[in-house]
Image (cartoon, helix red, strand yellow):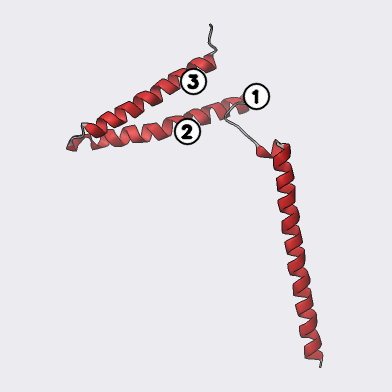
Amino acid sequence: MKKSPKQIAAIIALIAIVALIIAYFVSAIIATPESGNTFFAFFFAIIAIPILLWLFLFCYGRLTQKHTIAEYFPENDEETKKILEEIELNRFNEAMAAETENMETNDTSANASDE
């Protein structure tokens, strides 16, 4: 079965991450006073490599005008659109209720000052 370049890159990335995690645990077990920098370097790499891979995929998708797994825009989802519309409607209703209450308070204070 022939693998695409994306699949090969994903396999290599997974192998690199697994190797880093194993090296991280081994460096934690056989730690010496001089190995502190190695321990933190593995820790940084475990976090940085997936973020950099995601960033690469995102940029690749944007440059080639293709959708990739690295991007998800929930505003394009119908269910999310309905939820956002409901939230906006609730905020509008709350703002209108607060404004109405503010106007009523101003009217009563104006009437009290007239007397």
The residue indicated by pointer 3 is: 10
Q: Distance between the residues labelled 2 and 1?
A: 20 Å
Choose the circle earlier in sequence order: 3 or 2. Answer: 3
Q: SS class of the residue under badge 2?
A: helix
Q: Which amino acid does label 3 sit on?
A: Ala
- Residue 46, percent across and down? 39, 32
Q: Residue at x 49, y 20 (%)?
A: 10
Instruction: Verify CB contact (< 8 Å) between mark 2 and mark 1.
Output: no
- The image quadrant that residue 102 belongs to is bottom right
Residue at left offset 57%, top offset 30% = 70
**In the picture provided, is 69 more to the left or to the right than 103?**
left
Q: Give the Cα separation between the discs numbered 1 and 3.
A: 18 Å
Bin the neighbour count of mark 3 within 10 Å (Cα to Cα): few under 14, some 14-19, many 20 and up.
Answer: few
Amino acid type of the residue that numbered disc 1 sits on in the rendered structure: Lys
Sequence-first disc among 2 and 1: 2
Position of 99 with respect to 31 (left or right) is: right
**Vertical arrangement, residue 55 with respect to residue 64, above or below:** below
Circle 3 sits in a helix, a strand or a loop, which is it? helix
Disc 2 residue crowd, few under 14, some 14–19, many 20+, Cα 10 Å: few
Query: Which residue type does callout 2 highlight?
Result: Ile
Quarter of the image where one finds residue 24: top left
Residue 66 is marked as 1
